[in-house]
């Protein structure tokens, strides 16, 4: 049986989860479709999801279309949980992007579509809510072509749109206007069809056009548009037919070595770790050993998805998604085997930070343990403990995410946690070059020399060797690198140091002071040497800058430009468009919340703001400081006298 791993993406409230329910119900995977309003959907299982009516964690279900087994992955639509979408993109074969027929193309929809196109993923666009008053058709198709994809092509049309009895009619070979539009769209990427379109050859048959539509859809070059209603089930048969015809089944050598990726971690009722993994090639069997997170663990149990349920299995095959038990070292993003999934991050990292402490000091250890488990499920919260301040720092996308974490700590772990005000998350970059050398004897029986220097923006941290590798066992070099990376989490001003190159220049295995030095001695000394190198290199604090795209009515242009100036934004010249203006430019992430608050009153609720992380830029004025851990090396900014 063929397998298709299908993701459903959408702006919040476009009806994504309701559509998932209808797909499961229409194919017989469940007996009745759940309701978001009633809190009884099959894909939203967390208490917070049902209370808030939003998806917080990605979930997997399955259904079958004849000989095609579809693993359906429902993803969050709220931007605070965009990291869940990011992780899922690496394991998908195709996507349904849901657009509301009433609200039209919204800001998050555009962000999602850009990510889909960057990854080159096949995508169907499903226009939901055609039964609602105010549903659009022709104007919405123009929005989709303008804002999402010029290669979007409607393969059917709604009937009685905007009424409770709305339905969907799929175009066929007899629809002359559709054949003409289809020929024009496909001609962009097919020279033979282009020749026919220009009258230089005979028109292609309808069967050939449909085959070419499938080929271009699978390549991410064409984006078929369908209409329907998740509430009534209208258009669902047409959508299921398009999934089977136009999206690609999973490919991969079933007889090759096992390779795959972990995209989700959760804990079972007994606290055991469960890893969700997509297998790209080969197979895995029960009790087989798998290397993840630097250690080999035995697979204690396997479950695969089959017609709505996760069922116990003896093995998992290429193309399938499995729940693997017993892999205690597994982490989100781990890959195994020779094949590798896409690794480029589709969305920007979190740019906000908060600090958490237990309301009752006796719960401090339990708080850290609970947050560590939550960090397994969402590594981008980037858990950082400060023993001296009895606080834990978290990275965030927004306030809703913070509220959900607080509620989870209270409901699932019985911990009352207090959160500080959310602040902007900065980074540090080296200003110059610093070199430090510490020779044994010192606090550790080891000798290490490190040179720290700037690297290109966005390059992260690179650790290199400028010495003969035979001087030390490989484990010693790895220990130094681990110590260096740990030390870079807190720079001169308390922020993480990035965009730098650290070169290990010296090391000697000393025998003169008793036992031969160990890898642990090198790991312990490395942060001290790095702290001194960083002090000599100095650093500057950089804050996140967002790229914004703002659509405003014509009568709001002047007020909006004034507001952007007051927020120290960097707008580009306005571009006139139908109904108003398009403003683009850059704004500090710290000012973004103020801009979002000003938008509704200044535009009468008609402004549309879309933002995306662009870069880090040096802070103007006194650099903001973040409290540093009380333990560990304490680098200090270099003074004029010591330069």
Image (cartoon, helix red, strand yellow):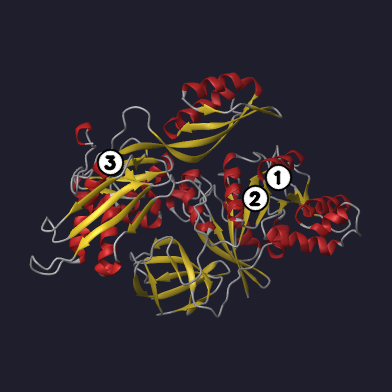
Label number found at residue 131: 1
Q: Quadrant of the C terminus?
A: top left
Residue 439 point in image, percent of width and height = 15, 56
| Label 3 element class | loop
Of residue 418 and residue 206, the one placed in the foreground of this image is 206
Image location of residue 73, percent across then percent down:
55, 59
**Residue at point 17%, 62% (across, down):** 521
The tag on residue 231 is 2
The first of marks 2 and 1 along the sequence is 1
| 126 left or right of 532 in image | right
Q: Image check: 202 left or right of 523?
A: right
64 and 340: which one is in front?
340
Q: Which residue is painted at 42% across and 60% down in the image?
A: 332
Rendered image quadrant of residue 542: top left
Which of the numbered marks, if any, corresponds to residue 371? none
Q: Residues within 10 Å of mark 1 (few under 14, many from 20)?
A: many
Question: Mark 3 to mark 2: distance in Å?
Answer: 51 Å
Q: Is 103 or 580 nearer to us in this picture?
A: 580
- Going from N to C along the chain, the mark reached first, 3 or 2, is 2
Q: Nearer the viewer, residue 500 or 71?
A: 500
The image position of residue 565, as x and y in percent, is 50, 22
Query: Which class describes the residues within 10 Å of circle 3: few (<14), some (14-19), or many (20+)?
Result: many
Vertical order, 320 against 563 (above or below): below
Q: Pointer 3: what residue?
A: 494
Confirm whether residue 429 shows in the render. Answer: yes
Residue at the (49%, 78%) spot, across then down: 315
Q: Is label 3 or label 2 in front?
A: 3
Classify 10 Å Cα crowding around label 2: few (below 14), some (14-19), many (20 and above).
Answer: some
Compute the Cα span from label 2 to label 1: 8 Å
Q: Is 387 drawn above or below residue 520 in the view shown?
A: above
Secondary element at image label 2:
loop
Q: Is residue 568 above or below residue 262?
A: above
């Amino acid at each position: 049986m063929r397998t298709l791993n299908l993701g459903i993406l959408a702006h919040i409230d476009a009806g994504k989860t309701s559509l998932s329910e209808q797909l499961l119900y229409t194919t017989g995977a469940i007996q009745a479709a759940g309701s978001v309003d009633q809190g009884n959907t099959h894909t939203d299982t967390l208490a917070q999801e049902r209370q808030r009516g939003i998806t917080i964690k990605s979930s997997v279900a399955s259904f079958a279309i004849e000989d095609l087994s579809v693993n359906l992955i429902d993803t969050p639509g709220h931007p605070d949980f965009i990291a869940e979408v990011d992780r899922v993109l690496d394991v998908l074969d195709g996507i349904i992007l849901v657009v509301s027929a009433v609200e039209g193309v919204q800001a998050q929809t555009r962000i999602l579509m850009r990510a889909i196109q960057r990854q080159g993923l096949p995508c169907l666009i499903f226009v939901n809510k055609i039964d609602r008053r105010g549903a659009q058709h022709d104007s919405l198709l123009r929005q989709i072509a303008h804002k999402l994809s010029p290669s979007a092509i409607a393969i059917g049309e709604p009937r009685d749109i905007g009424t409770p009895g709305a339905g969907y009619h799929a175009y066929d070979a007899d629809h002359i206007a559709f054949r003409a539009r289809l020929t024009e769209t496909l001609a962009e990427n097919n020279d033979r069809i282009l020749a026919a379109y220009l009258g230089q050859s005979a028109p292609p048959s309808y069967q050939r056009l449909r085959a070419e539509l499938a080929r271009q859809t699978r390549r991410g070059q064409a984006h078929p548009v369908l209409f329907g209603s998740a509430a009534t089930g209208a258009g669902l048969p047409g959508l299921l037919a398009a999934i089977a015809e136009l999206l690609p089944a999973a490919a991969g050598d079933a007889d090759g070595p096992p390779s795959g990726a972990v995209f989700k971690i959760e804990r079972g009722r007994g606290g055991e770790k469960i890893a969700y993994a997509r297998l790209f090639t080969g197979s895995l069997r029960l009790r087989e050993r798998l290397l993840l997170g630097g250690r080999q663990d035995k697979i204690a149990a396997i479950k695969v998805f089959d017609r709505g349920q996760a069922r116990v299995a003896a093995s998992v095959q290429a193309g399938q998604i499995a729940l693997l038990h017993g892999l205690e070292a597994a982490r989100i993003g781990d890959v195994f085997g020779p094949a590798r999934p896409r690794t480029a991050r589709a969305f920007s990292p979190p740019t906000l930070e908060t600090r958490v402490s237990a309301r009752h000091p006796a719960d401090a250890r339990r708080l850290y343990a609970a947050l560590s488990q939550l960090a397994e499920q969402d590594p981008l919260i980037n858990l950082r403990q400060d023993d001296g301040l009895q606080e834990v720092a978290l990275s965030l996308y927004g306030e809703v995410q913070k509220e959900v974490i607080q509620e989870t700590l209270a409901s699932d772990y019985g911990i009352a946690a207090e959160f500080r005000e959310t602040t902007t998350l900065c980074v540090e970059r080296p200003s110059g070059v610093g070199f430090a050398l510490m020779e044994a004897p010192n606090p550790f029986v080891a000798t290490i020399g490190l040179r720290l220097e700037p690297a290109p923006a966005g390059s992260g941290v690179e650790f290199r060797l400028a010495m003969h590798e035979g001087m030390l066992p490989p484990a010693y070099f790895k220990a130094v690198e681990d110590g260096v990376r740990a030390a870079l989490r807190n720079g001169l001003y308390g922020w993480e140091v990035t965009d730098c190159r650290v070169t290990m220049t010296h090391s000697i295995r000393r025998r003169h002071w008793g036992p031969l030095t160990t890898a642990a001695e090198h790991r312990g000394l490395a942060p001290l040497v790095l702290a001194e190198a960083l002090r000599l290199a100095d650093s500057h604090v950089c804050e996140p800058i967002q790229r914004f795209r703002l659509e405003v009515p014509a009568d709001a242009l002047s007020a909006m430009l004034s507001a952007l100036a007051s927020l120290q934004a960097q707008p580009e010249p306005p571009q006139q468009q139908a109904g108003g203006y398009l403003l683009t430019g850059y704004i500090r992430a710290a000012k973004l919340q103020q801009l979002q608050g000003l938008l509704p009153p200044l535009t009468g609720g008609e402004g549309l703001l879309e933002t995306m992380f662009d870069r880090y830029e040096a802070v103007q004025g006194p650099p903001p400081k973040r409290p540093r851990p009380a333990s560990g090396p304490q680098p200090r900014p270099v003074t004029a006298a010591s330069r």
